[in-house]
Image (tube, helix red, strand yellow):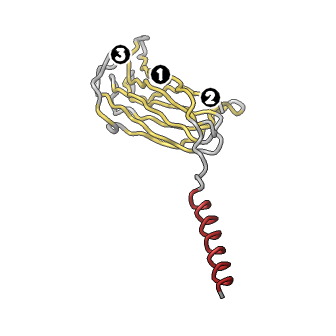
Amino acid sequence: MRAVKRRFASAMATAAAVSGTVLAAPGPAHAAWGTTSPVSIQVVGRNPLGGVTDIGRADGWVQFDSGGNTFRYSLTICRQSSYVWPRLVIAVDAGWVGSTWVDTPVENVYLPSGTPTTPTSPCYGDTYTVTGTDTYSNPWNVEFVLWGGYYGSTYQDISKNTVVSDPY
């Protein structure tokens, strides 16, 4: 009987050790964040006489993870002379297909949102810092499009974009 108890105890100890090892095993590691890439966008309006007016601006950075699926950003966006609050569109896989520019929008940021920030030159209007993290399966790049509104001779929604390649 003692032999049976010892074998049972030994089997239980082995099972506990194995299950403890499985429970203590670390999960998959998160990919490392790469270096930050700068982002800077200035939207301008042009009137029929050739005059230029600053509409909105975004400055900050984007950072990709080495796994190639996630990116994060931090941008300070200011309303300069836009008649409407600026809007930021974040898209992936942007580029020309024939003569058509295509992208896949993943996020829209409408101001006022984020953290109010004190404007510094060249910003002179309402300013907010927005941050975020997005995941998309193997993007080639990330596109940031800043939109504003301007009256030249008529009202126009105008935008400017910048594209940052994913190094992974």
Q: Could one spot residue 37 in this view of the protein?
A: yes
Q: Report the front residue among 117 and 26.
A: 26
User: Which residue is farthest bottom?
Assistant: 1
- Amino acid at circle 1: Ser
Q: Could one spot residue 155 in this view of the protein?
A: no
Q: Is residue 45 above or below residue 114?
A: above
Element assignment for label 2: strand
Name the image quarter holding residue 56: top left
- Amino acid at circle 2: Ser
The residue to which callout 3 is attached is 122
Horizontal and vertical percent position of residue 135 = 56, 44
- Amino acid at circle 3: Pro
C-alpha separation, residue under disc 3 versus residue under disc 1: 12 Å
Label of residue 165 in the image: 2
First in sequence: mark 2 vs mark 1: 1
Circles 3 and 1: CB atoms closer than 8 Å: no
